[in-house]
Amino acid sequence: MTTPRLALLASPVDEAQSALAALTACHGNHAPRDADVIVSLGGDGFMLQTLHRHGALGKPVFGMKLGSVGFLMNQYREEDDLLDRIAAAEPAVLHPLEMQVQTESGAIVTSLAYNEVSLLRQTRQAAHVAIELNGEVRLDELVCDGVMLATPAGSTAYNFSAHGPILPLGANVMALTPIAPFRPRRWRGAVLKSGTEVRFRVLNPHKRPVSATADSHEVRDVTEVLVRESRDRRVTLLFDPEHNLEERILMEQFAV
């Protein structure tokens, strides 16, 4: 069996850089476009950065935790079993969200999100947002600090901290979750089919400015945000069998 070529990428922190040097000495290091597997060394933030930069290549990604948060990562181990771990790893296929934003200046900005697309108020004024699903208005006016649409992989992150539901991987659903809603007081969000097209219209954007963020890519002064799950773009994350992503998401639902 041919030994896979690895692209080793590391966050700037000292621990990740030391691991990069050790693994490069053992396995070599290839450019992501020439590799069979991308190995991401860092935390979840660096994993998302890796996916945004190299996800279009279609290469599977095996992450190892060398950062503060590592939900999307495997544990880092110094012993030389990386190739065996990659060979035995279980895949998790993720579809990102496609965000298309229109700003007050008339600009159109697009971006992808593997965790969530979030709208947030830019000033002390609460945001006023109308929500359409597949072209039909479902909420005339949500008064809130913000609102987000999260993938299953991202449902345990910002979405969960905003009291949104944790979604099973492969359930083909998304979480629509308000952030500090004021009106309607009892609206707690919704679980939507993954094929649903969600449009957010910002009401009175000049007085109540809103920003939109796809993972870490922020666009300010938005007037309208269209979000849908991408069926064309997909990434494959690799996990050690005993700690695969589906099991992690399940365990989060029983964490105390």
Image (cartoon, rainbow, N blue to C red):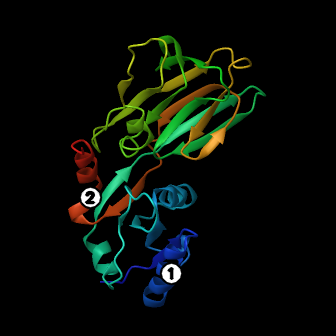
Image coordinates for residue 34, horizontal then vertical, percent: 52, 75
Please report the residue visible at 68 percent of the width from the left and 29 percent of the height from the top: 102
Image coordinates for residue 217, horizontal then vertical, percent: 61, 45
Q: The N terminus lies in which quarter of the figure?
A: bottom left
Q: Residue furthest bottom?
A: 25
Image coordinates for residue 172, horizontal then vertical, percent: 32, 37
Q: Nearer the viewer, residue 156 or 201?
A: 156
Mark 1 or mark 2, whichever is nearer to me: 1
> Is 176 above or below relative to 140?
below
Q: Would residue 149 be seen by someone viewing this image from the given angle?
A: yes
Image coordinates for residue 182, horizontal then vertical, percent: 49, 15
Please report the residue visible at 50 percent of the width from the left and 57 percent of the height from the top: 51
Per the image, the residue denoted by label 1 is: 18
Please report the residue visible at 54 percent of the width from the left and 61 percent of the height from the top: 54
Q: Residue furthest right?
A: 105
Label 1 sits on what residue type? Answer: Ser
Q: Nearer the viewer, residue 176 or 230?
A: 176
Per the image, the residue denoted by label 2 is: 244
**CA gap, disc 1 and disc 2:** 26 Å
Q: Which class describes the residues within 10 Å of circle 2: few (<14), some (14-19), or many (20+)?
A: some
